[in-house]
Image: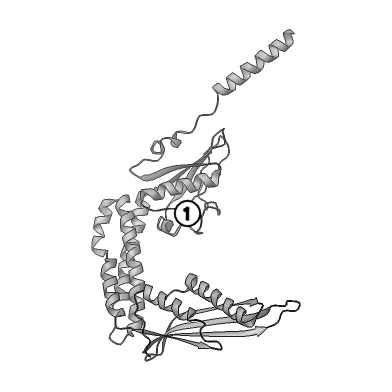
Amino acid sequence: MKNIFYLIASLCLFLVCSNCFAELPPEWVDNPSAIYDKDSYITAVGTGKDRKAAEASAINALASIFGQSVSAETKSSKNLAESHGAQGQNYQGRTSISQDISLHTDIKSLINAEIKLTWSAPDGTCYALALIDKYDAANYYSREIAKLHDDIVELTATAEDESPLSACMNHKSAFDLAEKQNEYISILTVLNSADAMLVEDKIISPNKVKKALSQLQQKVPIHISIAGTTGDWNNKIQKVFAGKLQSYGFKTTPKESRYELICTVEMYEYKLPGNPNQMIKYTLNTVLMDNEEALELSPYYTEGQTGASTIEGAVDRAYMLLEKKLKAEYTLES
């Protein structure tokens, strides 16, 4: 009986002592600036059920400081730092972040973001510390803003003999760069407001570029022509391209024009052994043309196959698939 009593007493004492000596979290979990001076670094701590979730949470928290965001849909190849954490241990390193951490395009501008530390608590909760070195990042964004300025100036310097269509595409690219430049100056302002003021004269307003682009587009009415073995089916392809062009600010015209979006749709019947359905192979090839200059822009090609109980049904399904693909994939590129 005494032995049982001593055994129970010893077990209770062991549990009490174990609880007394339970591991405390490292100081950076609640106070990152204790390790990384806030004058030199921007830091954020994230938590999750495992290391990957904690890293994503930390990057998201860091991104929010710059008005950015993270999602799990878009892959990113950023060279972030990975810290291999084990329960109750801290590790440091500068390898690549877990491949399963996928970053939204908005976060791509945080080039110098790193996961510097991770820690796993005894209860299984994981913590991660993300940081940016202010000095290194500020230098990077200052250089990028200056480079973007030069690229925008070059793209918007329309030559006298340049095709108006080509000029439109260049201005569209310049507008995209101007928006990126605005994003960079916002980040630089958070990193170092003095550095941001030094490059203010390099900032080009996206609205200014967009206004110039709109003026050019008024001189470029685009005619859409659909050709091929089956042409268009209930104007499905025509409507998609018209919507795409108009979303980019271009005017479309039913009349023949110097500027033409030429689309060729080909469909062929074929048989699959043992399959009673009527099968169709289809291809779609398109290009945006300045016929006067023999200039070809924005080439796009897709192909596929489908089937139905009748040829008409198979063709209709093929056009539905093409309509869906074009809405998702077609873009205007110079």
The single residue placed furthest to the right in the displayed view is 274
The residue lying at 59 percent from left, 84 percent from top is 267
Q: Is residue 39 above or below residue 179?
A: above
Residue 124 shows in the view: yes
- Point out residue 289 in the picture as x, y percentages from the top left corner: 41, 86
Reading the image, the residue beneath label 1 is 71
- Point out residue 49 in the picture as x, y percentages from the top left corner: 55, 41
Quarter of the picture containing the N terminus is top right
- Point out residue 129 in the picture as x, y percentages from the top left corner: 46, 43
| In the foreground, 308 or 137 | 308
The residue lying at 50 percent from left, 88 percent from top is 227
Residue 2 is left or right of residue 312, and the answer is right
The residue lying at 51 percent from left, 57 percent from top is 73
Residue 334 shows in the view: no
Q: Secondary structure at mark 1?
A: loop
Residue 267 is left or right of residue 211, and the answer is right
Total numbered labels placed on residues in the image: 1
The residue lying at 56 percent from left, 33 percent from top is 123
Residue 44 is left or right of residue 285, and the answer is left
